[in-house]
Amino acid sequence: MNKIQQNSPFGQYALFYTFESFYKKYLNFHKFSLRSNLIDFETMNVSEFVVKLTQQGVQLWADNDKLNVRSPKGVITPEIQAELATRKLEILAFLQEIDTVTKSASIPLREGLSLQTIGRLIGGFTGESAVGYQLPIINPQVMAQNLNVTFRPLPSGYKNESIIKFRQELAIKLKNYGVRVLSWQEATTDFFYDVKLPIINWNQRLKMRGIRSEIDAVIDVERPNSLIVNLGIFVAENLYSFYSYWLLQNRELSVMKIAKLSSWAEDHAAKYVENPTNTQVIIITEIDNKFVDPQLPYQTKINIGINTLVKTFSEIVIGVSSDKISILNMNLSDSTFAKNEIDRFILKSLIPKIFVPIAPLLLNRFEVGDYNSYASEYAAKLVKLGQDLASTGLFPPGFKLAEVIKRKSHRDIVNVIVNGRTGVSYGFVAYAEPPNYVGASEITANEWEQLLPIEGFSRDEIRQNEQGRRYIKTLIAGEYLFKQIPDIWLVSSRSGSNKTDLHLETDVIRIGLKDKLYLQLPQGVERQGVDIKPSYDIYVMLAMSLAAALYTPELIKNGAPIVHFHGYPAFDWFEGNEYCVGVHNPSVPCGTYESGVLNFLGISSLANQQLETINLISLVEPDHGTNFIAHDGEYLVERLKAGCAGGQVELGGKHFASLKANVGEE
């Protein structure tokens, strides 16, 4: 039985931020205009001179003491050519300094690529300036050092000693990991806002103490509402509904504006948050033993979990008992930790969730077009894949926000935060198309040396040929190979669709990854009438497809089915040529390219195992579920059906313990 007992591929590697600050300082691409090729050399230092040329498409790179120049036709005038000759030594020194800093930010991982390179590739940042690009962070200790949190003061007379003790211990341990824990006074400031109700001629300017937007999380305890508070909520909600319907005529408001208009009568932490899209609310409460019961049907778990989050109006709920800790967010994890595992709970689960909140991939990240879904072989395969998986029960029906969130103000806030989605579902199905190459898919080391650098990437990792095709230096079985980065395309179920009953005309979207991200919708679909949005897990799908193309090409050469559900396989379910990775990864939520990076690393970690055949890879996402990619759709369906029939593959966290116990952690 082949099982990869390897996880946490980042190991002990540190992350470097020097490059980001250096690049922002010297390569501010918005500072200088592109009015003409005329450059006032006398007023420019060497960095400004290089930036000006770079803006106009000129590529400069150093090769020892040689200055290499590649330019679009007509850009290099005789004056510029003379200036390049005059400033050659200065330019070489500047480029070498940048190269040194870039390399420090591009420390290769065991798989031979840096986090900077992986992040830019799967995030579709290839064609964009590095300015504003954020290096993916997958080390929880580094995440912790970038967090600001505050604890809301306990309510008067609060007497739950177990929660008080846990709260105190949590604050101390967060500080020990490097989290900046601010006092309530430090984390809040006075805010003023106006409420105007013209019909009843009521105008008031209200003042309240609010949490500053730079605070990543506010931690509170559950506060049951009194009868008087419930009455105030009823009045506030009706006033908001009246205001939004009659005065706004359903125009969209900001999250902050909605919260101000509707939450003045409530006493929850969200009321004090300046910007709920930046600051997560975390509630500590007594553990819900029914919710964490591994035997509970998952559909019941969905209802309990969503209502718990809505009731507390929080993004994360921590359950505490005398011997256990649980954690819940919109991923509906049911992970539990023994009290003596509090350090693991904080480092591997809580900190990643605070640092990387659940968020959809916004449409402005894509170049949007359309495609003929009826003519797509892989769209048809995807529909069949979903239908064939229906009997497994791994893809429970989603829900409409209106069904579980009764208050209009809460629905409106959630609707803004989740980018206009009207419903939520759990899991996805996708089908990767065969990778698309133009020219040689692999080149020799000598050919690699002749290639050109690419802005924003280390020359030691990625270069391009004259036609603009990119090549990457990969480490496979201890040998460096130089492979073309193919165009990646896949078809995917849209967010909120019924994964086991997809319709070609409305439910199957096509995603592309080349120099940037592409989204293609089915031709003829009325975009205004159908809630067609990409899955939260697009980065994961693309990362798995690209990593498979680079490191396990036999797995994807004919296309590959990819599925994700909110459960886990038992360790004993795996057969020969089937592999499991990621069990001990930090619990980053879906919808982030950090999750994509971890899945990329999971597949690339197989490259040095000298494996002859790979039929299936299981990529575990703790507190979220499992991704599967296989060489054939029928094979994947039959294996999952067999696992479900034998009780070895289930929704929920029942089998996660067996994976943690049997899959080693590095």
Image: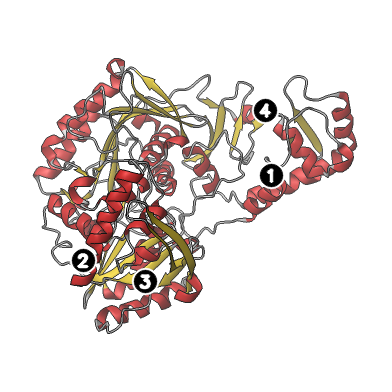
Rendered position, 215 above or below 455: below
Mark 3 or 1, nearer chain start: 1
Q: Which mark is residue 231?
A: 2
* Residue indicated by mark 3: 343
Looking at the image, tell me whether mark 2 or mark 1 is earlier in sequence order: 1
Q: Secondary structure at mark 4?
A: loop
| Residue linked to disc 1 | 28
Q: CA distance from mark 2 to mark 3?
A: 41 Å
Going by the numbered disc 4, the residue's amino acid type is Gln
Marker disc for residue 543: none
Q: CA distance from mark 3 to mark 4?
A: 50 Å
Q: Regarding mark 2 in the picture, which secondary structure is present there?
A: helix
Q: Residue at left 51%, top 65%?
A: 145
Residue visible at 36% across and 69% down?
219
Residue 450's disc number: 4
Residue drawn 75% across the image and 36% down it:
52
